[in-house]
Image (spheres, grey):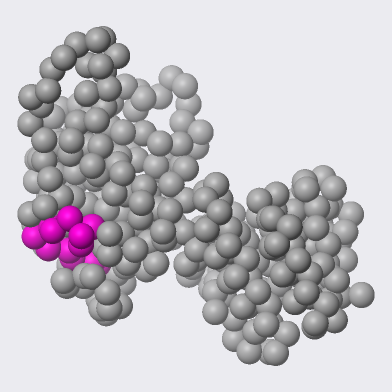
Amino acid sequence: MRTIVTDIAQLTDAHRAAIEAAARAHGFEARFFDSEADALADAAGAEILFTGSLALVGAAKALKWLCVPSAGVEPYLPREVYGSPDAVLTNSSGAYGVTIAEHIVMVTLELMRHRQEYAGIVAQRRWERQLPIRSIRGSRVTLLGTGNIGAEAAHRLRAFGPASIVGLNRSGRHPGGDFDRVLPISALDDALPETDLLVMALPGTRETAGLMDRRRLMLLPGDAYIVNVGRGSAIDQATLLELMQGGHLAGAALDVFEREPIPADDPIWDCPRLLITPHCSGNMTLGYTVDRIVAQFLEDFGNYCAWRPMERLVDRERGY
């Protein structure tokens, strides 16, 4: 029997029923498990894995297709992690735009309206209300990354009336939507001095590693904000900490870091004007996100069974 094995705990009964029906229609059996340990034995003979578990991937000697429920794929790129090294890889890019875009809006408003400072004031039972706030209205927004996350963020930020929304991507092609302009990543040095809010939504690749280094961080105006929801490797974290401690930048919100979890003794915990969230902007705690992940898996399952190209096929050399 051809089998699909999944250990994704967030699947509802409705999700399982939809996968089971699609599997049966194409001559597959879908097997659902509540944990990696429970799924390990069945993974060995699975043709398809719908999982984020590297242990299952390593055990799957008959694997032809791995679909991961994440957008990021760095752990799944090396051939040595596969029990079947010729298996193809797809991701769930396109499922996380809504939840991460809402996170971007939330932390941007928190920074600009001094939510952290006011929380401290209220915790001390003081009544102070004159901190000078900023607004997205009239701000120059630069989005590093114009995919699903960047597009959803641009759509929501547009409602606040920014002066401009500029996107940057590898090609410089305009994907449509709410971007005023789209530039190639080679134009980043020109875009940064004209930025009040920099939103980073980049994948983790060789090209993006260290992209925001000291020189580029210094190109930002001293009163700019940074929000990073992509990969911690894209920004020089130590330099960001040093510059913010010295008063450069109005604030930053980081959801991703060079090391995760952040060590308890890391000085970044005490960085002034830095809002830290524990890589939670794009996880699977929003029901809509899981709905999209399952819908996308079923779409590519139909493609797989019909020998059509899969929509979210990852180039393991390029990293996305």
Q: Quadrant of the N terminus?
A: bottom right
Q: Is residue 235 above or below residue 24?
A: above
Q: Is residue 241 above or below residue 232?
A: above
Whether residue 89 can be seen here: no
Picture residue at 46% right of the left edge, 31% below the top: 262
Q: Quadrant of residue 200?
A: bottom left
Q: Does the rendering let one see residue 248? A: yes
Residue 4 position in % (x across, y down): 79, 68
Magenta-span inclusion, residue 274 = no
x then y, percent, for residue 141? 17, 57
Say which residue appears at 19% left-offset and 43% top-offset: 225
Q: Is residue 124 above or below residue 86?
A: above
Say left or right for 152 vs 178: right
Residue segment shown in magenta: 157-168
> At x 19% / y 11%, what residue is drawn?
126
- Residue 239 at x, y = what percent? 26, 36
Across and down, in percent, residue 192 comes to: 14, 55
- Which picture quadrant has residue 237? top left
